């Protein structure tokens, strides 16, 4: 039997590393952890709480997808996050919704990968 102890990272394939970094670092404000870049290819990690989100263009066979899984990023101020992304022209695939336990929206990164914005406090 395999014993899984935690999720090591969530990885997203991207086509343009500079454009993706502008989105994840510039727009979302994520801070880089481990990075590897060489001749336009790379693996960039962002430490988000106890988890790691990675973006990469190292494999030509791993393609971005709007129909794949989505990581949910917990945000402090949901309304500000939504407004910031709308102002930047980011595409929403699930418009913001309020549920009894949370608020949620799903957006796409520049390659079309889905990212959820989540806030525990509905308001």
Image: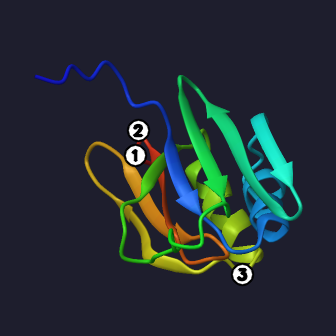
Residue 89 badge: 3
- Residue 45 rendering spot, x and y as whole percentages: 68, 40
Q: Nearer the viewer, mark 3 or mark 1?
A: 3
Total tally of numbered discs in the picture: 3
Q: Nearer the viewer, mark 2 or mark 3?
A: 3
Q: Dots 3 and 1: beta carbons under 8 Å?
A: no
Circle nearer the N terminus (2, 3) = 3
Label 2 crowding class (10 Å Cα cut-off): few <14, some 14-19, many 20+?
some
Q: Nearer the viewer, residue 20 or 97?
A: 20
Label 1 crowding class (10 Å Cα cut-off): few <14, some 14-19, many 20+?
some
Q: Nearer the viewer, residue 104 or 46?
A: 46
Distance of mark 2 from mark 3, alpha carbons? Answer: 25 Å
- Residue 119 rendering spot, x and y as whole percentages: 46, 44
Q: Nearer the viewer, mark 1 or mark 2?
A: 2
- The correct choice, above or below, for 114 with respect to 21 in the image is below
Q: Is residue 31 left or right of residue 115?
A: right
Q: Which residue is mark 2?
A: 120
Q: Secondary structure at mark 1?
A: loop
Distance of mark 1 from mark 2, alpha carbons? Answer: 6 Å
Is the N terminus in the top left, top right, bottom left or bottom right quadrant?
top left
Residue at left 66%, top 57%? Answer: 56
**Which image quadrant for residue 35?**
top right
Residue 122 badge: 1
Distance of mark 3 from mark 1, alpha carbons? Answer: 24 Å
Q: Secondary structure at mark 2?
A: loop
- The correct choice, above or below, for 8 with respect to 123 in the image is above
- Residue extending farthest to the left is 1
- Residue 38 rendering spot, x and y as whole percentages: 86, 54
Q: Nearer the viewer, residue 81 or 57?
A: 57
């Amino acid at each position: 039997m395999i014993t899984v102890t935690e999720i090591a990272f969530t990885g997203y394939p991207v086509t343009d590393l500079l454009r993706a970094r502008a989105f994840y670092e510039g727009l979302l404000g994520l801070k880089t952890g481990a990075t590897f870049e060489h001749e336009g290819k790379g693996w960039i990690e962002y430490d988000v709480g106890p988890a790691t989100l990675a973006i990469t263009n190292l494999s030509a066979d791993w393609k971005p997808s709007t129909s794949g899984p989505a990581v949910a990023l917990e945000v402090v101020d949901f309304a500000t996050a939504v407004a910031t992304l709308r102002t930047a022209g980011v595409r929403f695939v699930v418009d913001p919704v309020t549920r009894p336990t949370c608020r949620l929206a799903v957006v796409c990164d520049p390659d079309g990968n889905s990212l959820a914005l989540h806030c525990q406090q509905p308001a």
